Image (cartoon, helix red, strand yellow):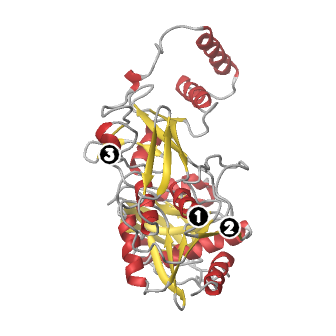
Amino acid sequence: MKKFFLILLLWPYALWGLPGGAARDLAHQFDGYAMVGTPWGGLIWSVVGGCRPRTSADLPGDASAPSTATADIARIMEVIRENYPDNVTEQKLRDAALKSMLQLSDPHATLLNPEEYAQLIAKSHALLAVPGIGLELDTTKSGPYPTVLYTIPNSPAHEAGIRSGDLLIAVNGRDSGSFELDQIMEALSGEEGSVVTVAVLSNDSNGRSPKELTLLRRPIAVPNIHSERVAPGIGYIDFSRFTEKSGLEMRMAIAQLMSPGDQLILDLRGNPSGLLEEAVYVASLFLDTDQPIVTIHYRESDELRTSFPKNGPYSRMPLVILVNGNTASASEVLAGALQDHGRAIVIGSKTYGKGSVQQIIKDYPEPGYAVKKTIATYELPSGRSINGEGLETGGLMPNVTVNVTPEMENQIARERRLRMLGMEPANAAPDKALITAIRRLKSHAP
């Protein structure tokens, strides 16, 4: 079931990483990106070996120097221009060639055009309230028009009366049945204060015509954490991503939810990563003094991250962690470190397997563009690597495997999002992994 959450989450923007002087002392790793930035200046600088910006001038070689290889590439581009039935610009051909070269030996490397680079910057902002209209669509149901799955409470869509089951007939006067999926998302997105006009056919319209609504995009608060008691003496915390202050949010949630002697289920399913420093902080809450959490292997040096210099406040709390194939990077570091130290039972399915750090080189090969490349890998306390998505050796294997169908996985993910937004889903599906975790903790209760 494909779903499209039509509000853009913006994540922490001023990010630090890579070894060398003060930069290493203040290191933050964001979703595998090692960057330095200023929130007011819109700049992202990479630091290598010391505290200075990494730019295209630092790259080896003379890009303008002729060679047999560049001549061959130019000839192939000429063949395409002369024979391909549609017009292809030289810029598009060059970009495609550069992306292919970058990805030959590094699956995470790529060339970012100005639009893609701007999107990367936006996703790095430390904002939890973002412009949008606040609805999620399901395009898998029968009929040519996307169906509204739900609207976020207090959002423009919700206040306009749009509800689950309604059909999105048109966006800005254009029939949405003629839209590609990415075009629908783009048309509904926009800057704060801008407007979008939608035509919606209500689920209970009984043959009436669609109603046309003009919605003003505004910041929508998107919670990052949900906590509740799922059984006597068992707390449950769902974490969608590691952002700034996630560690403190976790600590506060535990303090408010749990009592002495309680047991905890931490849900990292679908958590695609975020700030490594926050994942290290959360791991430290459950570990003893100075225990290793992760080693970051750079080309010429290693960096070890350890737990607090004193026992974590919950170092004796019984803990289960839920994971799946979309648990990645910093989330895998957290689950893997606690699994290695015997502090958590990991339940679910094999994780994604992203154990690498990417660096961004701005203004290369020309202003506005950027190159992303891998510069380091993660290693867990036991010495195992989580890197290698889609490979037998990549990712984490849970202690207890619980397999569910992709359809059920998507259904459970949607229901978790609803709960995070403060809504209780109707006719909730049985969550096999959560049920297994509760049974496990009950059977091992003191």
Amino acid on which the number 3 mark rests in the picture: Asp
The residue lying toward the viewer, choosing from 193 and 381, is: 381
> Tag 1: residue type?
Gln
Label 1 crowd (10 A; few <14 / some 14-19 / many >=20) = many
SS type, badge 2: loop
Mark 2 vs 1: CB contact within 8 A: yes
Q: Which residue is mark 2?
A: 399
Name the side, left or right, on which 377 lies relative to 399: left
Regarding residue 315, the answer to whether it shows in the image is yes
Image x and y of residue 165, in percent? 60, 77
* Quarter of the image where the C terminus is located: bottom right
Distance Cα–Cα, label 3 vs label 1: 27 Å
Amino acid type shown at disc 2: Asn
Q: Residue at x 49, y 74 (%)?
A: 151
Q: Around disc 2, counting alpha carbons within 10 Å, would you say few (fewer than 14), some (14 to 19), or many (20 or more)?
A: some
Total label count? 3
Q: Position of residue 156 (x, y in %)?
A: 40, 71
- The answer to whether residue 216 is visible is no
Residue 354: x percent and y percent?
58, 49
Instruction: Using the image, tell me which numbered label, if any, was put on residue 339.
Output: 1
Give the quarter of the image for residue 215: bottom left
Q: Name the residue nearer the viewer: 252 or 225.
A: 252
Residue named by callout 3: 25
Q: Quadrant of residue 96?
A: top right
- Residue 374, placed above or below residue 382: above
Instruction: Compute the Cα span from label 2 to label 1.
Output: 8 Å
Q: Earlier in the sequence, mark 3 or mark 2?
A: 3
